[in-house]
Image (tube, rainbow, N blue to C red):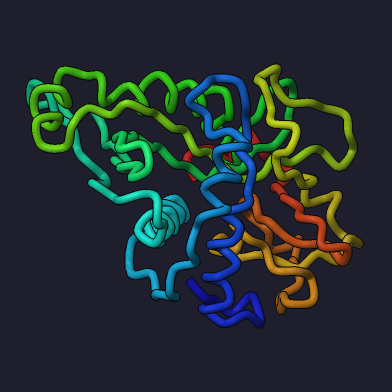
Amino acid sequence: MSNAYSKLTSGEQFRNDINAVLTCPSLTCGPASVASKSWLSAFRAEAEIPEHAEYQGNRRLGFYYQWLWQQLIEAHPHYRLVAEEVQLTWNKQTLGAVDFLVMNTVTNQLEHWEVAIKFYLAYQDSWPGPNANDNLDKKTARMLEHQLALCDHPAFRQQLAPQFGQPAIKRLIMQGRLFYPHDKNTTGSSIAINPHALVGTWCYQSQAPGLQLKQLSKTQWISPPCYQELNMYLDTNELSIPTQAVGPDDQVWFVVPDHWPTHNRDR
């Protein structure tokens, strides 16, 4: 996913994105199903970097991120991709989709993985996303209580377990970045944050002039290029949606319109 915002080639951006997925810590910690530092380290230690391929799928960042994980699973010597995007229906209603069914070829256990790339801003004791209808607490609860429970539903046990088997292990891999306010006058919720999570700074557009930020395209959010590799300065006068950028010190910023979060919902 290359673009005009950066001097990087599509191959360089792909390798950076793959390396970012391999090294990015989970956003939260606590429940056993959340991918731990030790598990991610073990996966990375044996991982093989997949050959560069041009992504041809849906242009939304979450789909691209899931494709990066698919590439890593298929190239990994200790895991085999059994199925992905497995749709579940029950009584003519769609329950959701299982991201990945993965066979651990060392333990010979089937695993259910759910993956997500997310970005949240500390604001008034909560963690809203750029679309303020989304927040870290709600997303984590849904991933743990709904998505990772899909394989326990009778729809999976009756319709799909005979074909794929019943997963013995569940993993939530939710990576991304947490942004703390420029003016330091507000905090996030009390959810258990991974102390090693990637962080950045956020500010309102009226606070951004003078920061000399360079704009990121959304396709660069997974692995932001350094300041010198970016081409386009952020024009705060034209900013209408929350936008990521990089400062001269390579700090990652989120600049939001002055009306955020009130008017940045469902965008």
Residue 96 in view here: yes
Q: Quadrant of residue 218?
A: bottom right
Q: Nearer the viewer, residue 138 or 238?
A: 138
Q: Is residue 37 left or right of residue 139?
A: right
In the image, residue 192 sits, relative to residue 53, either above or below, namely above
Tell me if residue 79 comes above or below residue 160 in the rendering.
Answer: below
Is residue 188 found left or right of 23 in the rendered image? right
Q: How many marks?
A: 0
Please name the residue shown 52% across and 78% down the image. 10
Q: Residue at 47% across / 40% down in the picture?
A: 266
- The answer to whether one can see residue 64 in this image is no
Seen in the image, is 135 located left or right of residue 108?
right
Q: Position of residue 154 (x, y in %)?
A: 15, 18
Q: Position of residue 141 (x, y in %)?
A: 48, 21
Q: Residue at x 51, y 26 (%)?
A: 140
Residue 215 against residue 93 in the figure, above or below: below
Q: Position of residue 5 (x, y in %)?
A: 63, 75
Q: Position of residue 59 (x, y in %)?
A: 40, 62
* Of residues 198 and 48, the one drawn nearer to the viewer in this rendering: 48
Give the quadrant of residue 105.
Answer: top left
Q: Residue at x 74, y 41 (%)?
A: 179
Give the left or right position of residue 86, taking residue 107 as reference: left
Q: Is residue 75 above or below residue 44?
A: below
Q: Nearer the viewer, residue 155 or 79?
A: 79
Residue 224 placement: quadrant: bottom right
